[in-house]
Image: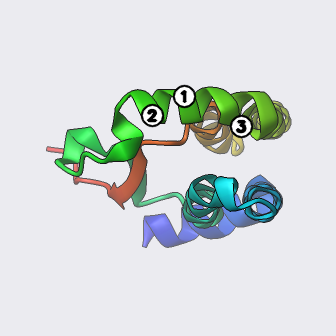
Amino acid sequence: MLSLIGNVLWFVLGGAAMGLAWWLAGLLALVSIVGIPWARACFVIGQFTFWPFGREAVSRAAVGRPGIGTGPLGLIGNVVWFLLLGVWLAIGHIIAALLNFITIIGIPFGIQHLKLAVIALAPIGMTIVAKRPSR
């Protein structure tokens, strides 16, 4: 129930705008055939950006799903991503975080935007999983 409340507040306090920004980046990546892997990552992370509470982004290698994005090609892909789109999405998340930090209720949402800013810098090789309950 808390995840639902958090997700609804998040959606209103910047999640919708940044989720759409991720999807726009995905559409821009789809313009070329070469950008399809980045586009897929954009749509997955965009959906995560709309409703992040109760889920988390982790390395594919950490959950036993290694692939082409977790090796040297993933590194090259992340460098290209950073130069073309990643830096702009990260800046958007940082601005959203700063706006959320203005209010006390927005602090957890600002922290989530900062986490997403880090993901925006290098999304290739990441996957979204359900968050494990704390012990």
Q: Which image quarter is the N terminus in?
A: bottom left
- In the drawing, what numbered circle is on residue 73? 2
Three-letter code, disc 2: Leu
Name the residue rendered at 68%, 54% in the picture.
35
Nearer to us in this view, 15 or 101: 15
Three-letter code, disc 1: Ile
Three-letter code, disc 3: Ile
Name the residue rendered at 73%, 56% in the picture.
22
Q: Is residue 58 visible?
A: no
Would residue 126 be found to the left or right of residue 52 on screen? left
Mark 2 crowd level (few <14, some 14–19, many ≥20, 10 Å Cα): some
Tag 3 secondary structure: loop
Q: Is residue 30 visible?
A: yes
Q: CA distance from mark 1 to mark 3?
A: 39 Å
Mark 1 crowd level (few <14, some 14–19, many ≥20, 10 Å Cα): few
Colour scheme employed for the rendering of this structure: rainbow
Tag 2 secondary structure: helix
Q: Dot 3 corresponds to which residue? A: 104
Q: Is residue 61 above or below residue 22?
A: above
Q: Dot 1 corresponds to which residue? A: 76
> What percent of the width, then of the height, locates residue 80?
68, 32
